[in-house]
Image (spheres, rainbow, N blue to C red):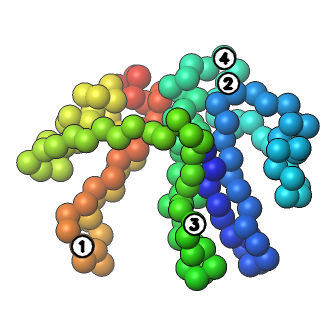
Amino acid sequence: MWVPEWHPGGHGLHLHYAMGRYVPRGKIDEAWGHGYVHIKRLSDVPPGAGGLRQGRSTARYLSKYVTKAFSSVDRASGLHRYEVGQGFQPRGLRLHGRSGHEALAKAVAVMGGAPAAEWWSRDAPAWEGPPAYWFSWDHARAVAS
């Protein structure tokens, strides 16, 4: 999965990219072919951590950039907020409830514990849209709850 982001100085795009397996640096440089490549391991995932923990850590990292607005919509015309490789599109899971609390209870059952963070539109005085809510789970907290 990759997420584009404009450089703060406005001189072009850079990408935040995640792969599900180790790929040698030389192969990445060769495949990219557009300049500088900086690689880092996500620091909150210990070696040997399970796939679920790795996936959640990666999702938290990339979601910071998915949720950022492009600073200049005209420059980003035609770009999506994220892209994934063929065959790797995440599957959605829809949970329905008659209230936000009912939907949250169903999500807690699926995730195995309470969310680490949540947001409710009713708590946002400037919110003018329909009722909305957002929840995020931290692996350690979901397992411990």
Query: Is 61 situated left or right of 129 in this image?
Result: right
Q: Which residue is mark 2?
A: 46
* Location of residue 131 by image quarter: bottom left
- The answer to whether residue 75 is above or below residue 119 is below
Marks 2 and 4 sit apart, C-alpha to C-alpha, by 6 Å
User: Mark 3 touching mark 1, by CB under 8 A?
Assistant: no
- Label 2 residue SS: loop
Q: Position of residue 42 (x, y in %)?
A: 69, 37
- Label 4 residue SS: loop
Pick the residue in front: 128 or 19.
19
User: Mark 2 touching mark 4, by CB under 8 A?
Assistant: yes
Using a 10 Å C-alpha cutoff, classify the residue at mark 3 as few (fewer than 14 neighbours), some (14 to 19) or many (20 or more).
few
Quadrant showing the N terminus? top right
Amino acid at the residue labelled 3: Leu
- Label 3 residue SS: loop
User: Mark 4 touching mark 1, by CB under 8 A?
Assistant: no
Pick the residue in front: 74 or 128.
74
Amino acid at the residue labelled 1: Gly
Q: Position of residue 97 (x, y in %)?
A: 13, 44
Q: Position of residue 71 (x, y in %)?
A: 60, 78
- Label 1 residue SS: loop
Marks 3 and 1 sit apart, C-alpha to C-alpha, by 25 Å
Quadrant showing the C terminus? top left
Amino acid at the residue labelled 4: Gly
Using a 10 Å C-alpha cutoff, classify the residue at mark 1 as few (fewer than 14 neighbours), some (14 to 19) or many (20 or more).
few
Q: Which residue is mark 3?
A: 79
Q: Nearer the viewer, mark 2 or mark 1?
A: 1
Q: Which mark is residue 48?
A: 4
Query: Is 57 situated left or right of 16 in this image?
Result: left
* Location of residue 18 by image quarter: top right
